[in-house]
Amino acid sequence: MKYEAPKKSPAAVAVGVKGEFVVAVKINKDGKVISANLEKVHPLLRRVLEEAVDKWLFSTDKNLEEREVKITFEYRIKSNNFKRNTDKPPKEDSHFKKPFRLVVTRIFYPISY
């Protein structure tokens, strides 16, 4: 229903963290997150993923007191060779893919010599 992409982690950006990271989220019948278990998460992303997931809102289900879904955060790194600009900082783009996958792509601009 509602999601927020994780904030940037400067430390994760600096070391080039990429890969798939899994968070198991328990949701109450109103669709609110009641807990998040970071099952497979890089240490430099723990805080930003927890903070993001806590703000998510899922569909309601009055038949279940609580339910659990696993969310996969996929971090990718991409180089944009078409725009060379030493002053341009890396850009992050995120989009949600069903079911329960958020793709975060970090786009770097190579240095021109």
Image: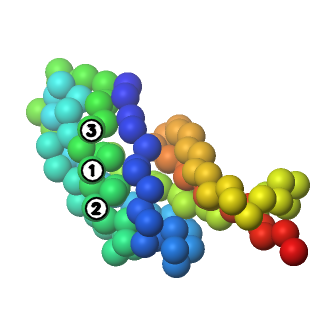
Marks 2 and 3, how far apart in space? 13 Å
The residue that appears at 50% across and 47% down in the rendered structure is 102
Residue 52 % position (x, y): 32, 46
Residue 80: percent from the left, percent from the top? 79, 58
Tell me the element at label 1: helix
Question: What number is the disc on residue 55?
Answer: 3
Q: In percent of the image, x 34 and y 56: which residue is there?
A: 49
Identified at 41% across, 62% down, the residue is 9
Mark drawn on residue 28: none
> Please, what is the three-letter code of the amino acid marked with disc 1?
Glu
- Disc 1 crowd rating (10 Å Cα; few below 14, some 14-19, many 20+) is some
Residue 8: name its quadrant.
bottom left
For disc 1, the marked residue is 51
Q: Are marks 1 and 3 in contact (CB under 8 Å)?
A: yes
Residue that numbered label 2 is attached to: 47
Q: Of residues 10 and 96, which is closer to you in this image?
A: 10
In the image, residue 102 sits, relative to residue 1, either above or below, namely below
Residue 48 visible at all: yes
Q: Are marks 2 and 1 in contact (CB under 8 Å)?
A: yes
Q: CA distance from mark 1 to mark 3?
A: 7 Å
